[in-house]
């Protein structure tokens, strides 16, 4: 199976080509089967390769397969090849597994959309790009996948491009991501400049061999890591580049689930974990990663508290959870970050698909203040959504609890500002629990707040949408147990040991068992407190939210306006560019200078011709005279 | 033996005559004749130099000029006929449509 590694990304590409080229002539069933089938096959191969890899001794890892020389220019050499180790294997499984379920879900969700085949062509293309990103064996090939997922994200956010807001959101995502990609490509150049290679194996070996005095607090490695992290902030929606992700909810809901929750946005986390060797040797950069992660988690969670659009709540929650992952990576616990990435992929895909099911059932309504009481109409959606909520809130026994606990413990043991990072993480855990239960209660509990005038027939979704929900709910229940806390079993978390060989990072620190128990209890307390608050606010005393928001109206309006970040960016970056483009580039450079030159040449020629054309009298004699004159001039020239 | 200058003077005189004819006459056939005179003036000069220098080149050149002149006369007269049919005149001063 390992030898079939190249098929994993290629099959979805094939699906994309078939659906993209012939989709107009194929039936919807065929299109769905091709798209889902290619991803299912990829998943099967990934699973086979993964199991085969598990049986191999650790020394034979990573498995690197080079297919051909891609670029050969002077001393620069890049191959096209794939690398399979514990980290990329796990990522491949997540991407193809969750991706497959979402493909199946989409066949029902997009059933009535006129762009059906286009949607699946894009979705498959995305799978191809994402798998290239994950499986690449060097930074340059990773960049290809990196750009590819950015492109597909743009295409899918703007899928309903006739809607102005969707087209704008697509452009915003693309442009904001460009900023991050610029950081990535600079990092790749700097890596080549420093290590004379972009190949993972060679770069990491060279970085490990680097003498300690070259590292320092601030050195080349810090520069590389910070530039890489700029790329990660773009793709993984961190401060300051997170603004595109909430707007990306303009896309179809399965897209939000697949790209903007489960897979693409984790690319940054994957890259940081992949480059753990480099980050471990750049403590300054690690601190930046941890602080940005914690800050993003806090700010996004606080915005999520007041959102009323079901998808926007989940979008900010995603940003917040991604911040969590970076907090873990910044604390040096890459395994915890990737573990959370995995559990998050399951429960956030579940939540988004559940939200999609709700929107589908409600006939397009997304405002949770207009929902309520859906528990009876959509029992399966409710049950799975409940599991997802319990998982993300960190209730013990569900997946999110284990990964969050691991991250909080890592934050506590972080070498710098450990207590502060931990407190932020804890606060975010409480807020997460609050806003998720608020969402759950407002959507499913209580009485319906919609009238039958608004919504004709609330109905449960069809089986192809419910089966992925149930499967994802099972994963959200069980996925956490691969990371069962050390305090309970007495040994390391299995997932941490498993990923350590992949990231080759230093062993995570552990405190005493009592401390670990205390940290765990604190995180559970935060989750339960959030749950209790949500219960009080939205079930017991429904008049409370309005009272709180009016008594703290300044804070409330800051939150509902998302800290005015969009407005600030618009004033600082967008407006100057627009003004400069209009006044300087357009009116001055384009209209005055370039058009002036072009039209000026035309006018000059024309006015000259206006004078000269009078030589053409039409009389034979005049022409003969000119010939004579010319002859005289020539003869005079020779006789001179 | 007649010196070469005589031939050259005769050639120059003929050429001038042709040129004056071309500029002064209005009838298009007279214009064509003037062109022929100029051509033959040049031919005379060619032959004179050829004989004077004892080289055959000039005479060969004259043959070419004669052939071209014959072709030109054929085309020119055809044009004259076409023009006359169109405009009912041979006066070149009344055919000045091809102008600015």
Image (tube, coloured by chain):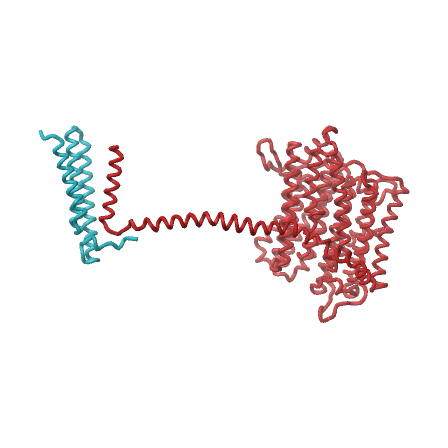
Quarter of the rendering occupied by the C terminus of chain A: top left
Q: Residue at x 14, y 35 (%)?
A: B9
| Number of callouts | 0
Q: Which chain is red?
A: A
Q: Residue at x 28, y 50 (%)?
A: A616
- Asked whether residue A41 appears in the rendered view, the answer is yes
Q: Which chain is cyan?
A: B
Q: Name which quarter of the figure residue A627 lies in.
A: top left
Q: Residue furthest right?
A: A514
Where is residue A360 shown, x and y percent of the image?
Answer: 70, 62
Q: Residue furthest bottom?
A: A453
Where is residue A409 shown, x and y percent of the image?
Answer: 83, 43
Residue sitting nearer the eye, A62 or A485 = A485
Quarter of the rendering occupied by the N terminus of chain A: top right
In the figure, B38 relative to A244: above or below? Answer: above
In the figure, A452 relative to A607: above or below? Answer: below
Where is residue A492 shown, x and y percent of the image?
Answer: 84, 40
- Asked whether residue A493 appears in the rendered view, the answer is no
Q: Name which quarter of the figure residue A73 lies in.
A: top right
In the figure, A602 relative to A330: above or below? Answer: below
- From the viewer's perspective, tell me whether residue B20 is left or right of residue A602: left
Q: Name which quarter of the figure residue A379 lies in.
A: bottom right
């Amino acid at each position: 199976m390992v030898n079939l590694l190249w098929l994993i990304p290629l099959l979805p590409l094939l699906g994309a080509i078939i659906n993209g080229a012939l989709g107009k002539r194929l039936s919807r069933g065929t299109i769905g089967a091709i798209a889902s089938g290619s991803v299912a096959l990829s998943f099967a191969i990934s699973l086979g390769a993964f199991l085969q890899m598990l049986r191999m001794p650790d020394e034979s890892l990573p498995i690197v397969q080079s297919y051909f020389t891609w670029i050969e220019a002077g001393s620069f050499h890049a191959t096209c090849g794939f690398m399979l180790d514990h980290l990329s294997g796990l990522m491949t499984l997540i991407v193809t597994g969750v991706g497959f379920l979402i493909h199946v879900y989409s066949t029902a969700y997009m059933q009535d959309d006129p762009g059906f085949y286009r949607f699946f062509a894009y979705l498959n293309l995305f799978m191809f790009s994402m798998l290239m990103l994950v499986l690449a064996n060097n930074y340059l090939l990773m960049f290809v996948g990196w750009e590819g997922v950015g492109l597909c994200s743009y295409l899918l956010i703007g899928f309903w491009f006739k809607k102005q807001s969707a087209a704008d959101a697509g452009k915003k995502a693309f442009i904001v991501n460009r900023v991050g990609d610029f950081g990535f490509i600079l990092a790749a150049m700097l890596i080549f400049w420093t290590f004379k290679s972009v190949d993972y194996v060679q770069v990491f070996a060279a970085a490990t061999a680097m003498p300690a005095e070259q590292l320092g607090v601030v050195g080349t490695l810090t520069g590389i890591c910070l530039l890489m992290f700029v790329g990660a902030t773009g793709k993984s929606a961190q401060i300051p580049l997170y603004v595109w992700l909430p707007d990306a909810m303009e896309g179809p809901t399965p897209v939000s689930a697949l790209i903007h929750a489960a897979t693409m946005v984790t690319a940054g986390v994957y890259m940081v974990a992949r480059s753990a060797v480099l980050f471990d040797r750049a403590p300054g950069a690690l601190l930046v990663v941890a602080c940005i992660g914690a800050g993003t988690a806090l700010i996004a969670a606080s915005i999520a508290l007041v959102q009323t659009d079901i998808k926007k709540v989940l979008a900010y929650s995603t940003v917040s959870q991604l911040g969590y992952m970076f907090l873990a990576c910044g604390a040096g616990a890459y395994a915890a970050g990737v573990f959370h990435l995995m559990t998050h992929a399951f429960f956030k895909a579940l939540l988004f698909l559940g939200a999609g099911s709700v929107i589908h059932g409600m006939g397009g309504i997304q405002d949770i203040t207009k929902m309520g009481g859906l528990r009876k109409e959509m029992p399966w959606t409710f049950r799975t959504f409940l599991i997802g909520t319990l998982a993300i809130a960190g209730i013990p026994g569900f997946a999110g609890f284990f990964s969050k606990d691991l991250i909080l413990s890592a934050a506590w043991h972080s070498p710098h500002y450990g207590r502060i990072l931990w407190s932020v993480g804890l606060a975010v855990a409480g807020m997460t629990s609050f806003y998720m239960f608020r969402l759950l209660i407002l959507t499913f509990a209580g009485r319906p707040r919609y009238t039958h005038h608004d919504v004709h027939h609330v109905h449960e979704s069809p089986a192809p949408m419910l089966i992925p929900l149930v499967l994802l709910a099972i994963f959200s229940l069980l996925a956490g147990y691969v990371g069962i806390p050390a305090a309970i079993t007495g040994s390391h978390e299995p997932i941490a040991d498993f990923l350590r060989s992949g990231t080759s990072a230093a062993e995570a620190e552990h405190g005493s068992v009592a401390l670990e128990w205390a940290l765990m209890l604190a995180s559970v307390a935060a989750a339960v407190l959030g749950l209790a608050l949500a219960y009080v606010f939205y079930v017991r005393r429904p008049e409370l939210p309005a009272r709180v928001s009016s008594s703290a109206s300044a804070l409330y309006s800051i939150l509902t306006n998302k800290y005015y970040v969009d407005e600030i960016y618009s004033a600082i970056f967008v407006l100057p560019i627009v003004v400069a483009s209009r006044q300087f580039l357009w009116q001055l450079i384009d209209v005055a200078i370039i058009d002036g030159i072009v039209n000026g040449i035309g006018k000059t020629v024309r006015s000259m011709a206006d004078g000269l054309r009078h030589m053409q009298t039409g009389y034979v004699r005049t022409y003969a005279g000119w010939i004579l004159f010319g002859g005289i001039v020539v003869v005079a020239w020779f006789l001179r | 033996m007649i010196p070469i200058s005589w031939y050259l003077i005769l050639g120059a005189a003929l050429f001038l005559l042709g040129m004056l004819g071309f500029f002064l006459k209005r009838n298009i056939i007279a214009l064509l004749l003037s062109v022929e005179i100029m051509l033959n003036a040049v031919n005379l000069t060619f032959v004179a130099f050829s004989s004077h220098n004892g080289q055959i080149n000039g005479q060969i050149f004259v043959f070419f000029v004669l052939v071209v002149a014959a072709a030109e006369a054929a085309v020119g007269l055809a044009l004259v006929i076409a023009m006359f049919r169109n405009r009912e005149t041979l006066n070149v001063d009344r055919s000045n449509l091809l102008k600015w």
